[in-house]
Image (cartoon, grey):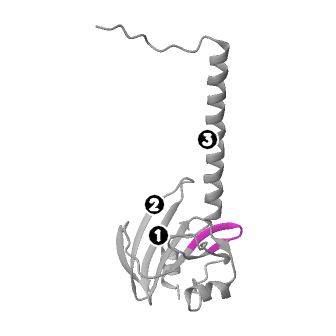
């Protein structure tokens, strides 16, 4: 039987320099790779736009929440970049400075995967699921398809918004 000697750390200064240089190159490559991935994520964010551009993208007037709740107002409109796989329009709503709802619309139909219940809202069958989020509030998600568009609406039950109010917001989308 042959005796196999276990590898050991470099003992000469020259070997230590080579090892240090190799580790430095790996660290720099990891850093650059992380920065590229982070930059790619930034490029995949929806860009802010106006109502006309969003309507042109969808090929029809921009659907919106029609029911008003207190001081809730539209706080932004965005369109996914051309590089996104399933481009969509995102319309956010806020009370004061706190965003409480996001309506996402895209061409096509939707097959909800996380349905906890099915309800009829605004004459449409809507899949509903709710989840507690990090800040302790509850996010209620609504999903449905109508007229060649797929809709999802997420409402944060905070800022005085109740589940009944959220149902009313979903029913009012036109």
**Residue behind mark 3:** 30
In the image, taking residue 116 as reference, residue 98 lies left or right, namely right
Q: CA distance from mark 2 to mark 1?
A: 8 Å
Q: Main secondary structure of the magenta part?
A: strand
- Whether pointer 2 and pointer 1 mark residues with C-beta atoms closer than 8 Å, the reply is yes
Whether residue 71 appears in this view of the structure is no
Earlier residue among tags 2 and 1? 2
Earlier residue among tags 2 and 3? 3
Residue 131 - label? 2
- Dot 2 alpha-carbon crowd within 10 angstroms: few under 14, some 14 to 19, many 20 or more: few
Q: What percent of the width, then of the height, locates residue 47? A: 67, 72
Q: Which residues are magenta?
A: 92-102
Q: What percent of the width, then of the height, locates residue 137? A: 54, 59
Q: What percent of the width, then of the height, locates residue 133? A: 52, 56
Say which of 9 and 113 sits in front: 9
Quarter holding residue 156 = bottom right
Say which of 24 and 78 sits in front: 24
Q: Is residue 100 magenta?
A: yes
Q: Secondary structure at mark 2?
A: strand
Q: What percent of the width, then of the height, locates residue 84? A: 55, 69
- Whether pointer 3 and pointer 1 mark residues with C-beta atoms closer than 8 Å, the reply is no
Q: Residue at x 43, y 75 (%)?
A: 143
Q: Secondary structure at mark 3?
A: helix
Q: Secondary structure at mark 1?
A: strand
Q: CA distance from mark 2 to mark 3?
A: 35 Å
Q: Residue at x 49, y 79 (%)?
A: 170
In the image, taking residue 104 as reference, residue 129 lies left or right, namely left
> Which label lies toward us, 3 or 1?
3
Whether residue 81 appears in this view of the structure is yes
Q: CA distance from mark 3 to mark 1?
A: 37 Å
Vertical side of 18 occupied by 120: above or below: below
Residue 141 - label? 1
């Amino acid at each position: 039987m042959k005796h196999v000697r276990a590898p050991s750390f470099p003992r000469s200064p020259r070997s230590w320099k080579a090892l240090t240089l190799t580790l430095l190159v790996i660290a720099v490559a990891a850093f650059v790779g992380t920065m590229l991935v982070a930059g790619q994520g930034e490029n995949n964010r929806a860009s802010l736009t106006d109502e006309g551009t969003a309507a042109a993208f969808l090929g029809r007037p921009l659907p919106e929440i029609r029911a008003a709740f207190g001081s809730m107002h539209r706080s932004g409109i965005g369109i996914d970049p051309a590089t996104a796989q399933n481009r969509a329009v995102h319309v956010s709503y806020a009370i004061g400075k706190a965003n409480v709802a996001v309506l996402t619309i895209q061409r096509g139909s939707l097959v909800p995967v996380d349905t906890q219940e099915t309800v009829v809202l605004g004459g449409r069958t809507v899949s509903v699921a709710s989840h507690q989020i990090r800040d302790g509030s509850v996010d209620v998600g609504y999903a449905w398809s109508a007229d060649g568009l797929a809709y999802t609406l997420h409402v944060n039950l905070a800022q005085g918004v109740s589940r009944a109010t959220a149902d009313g917001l979903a029913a009012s989308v036109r």
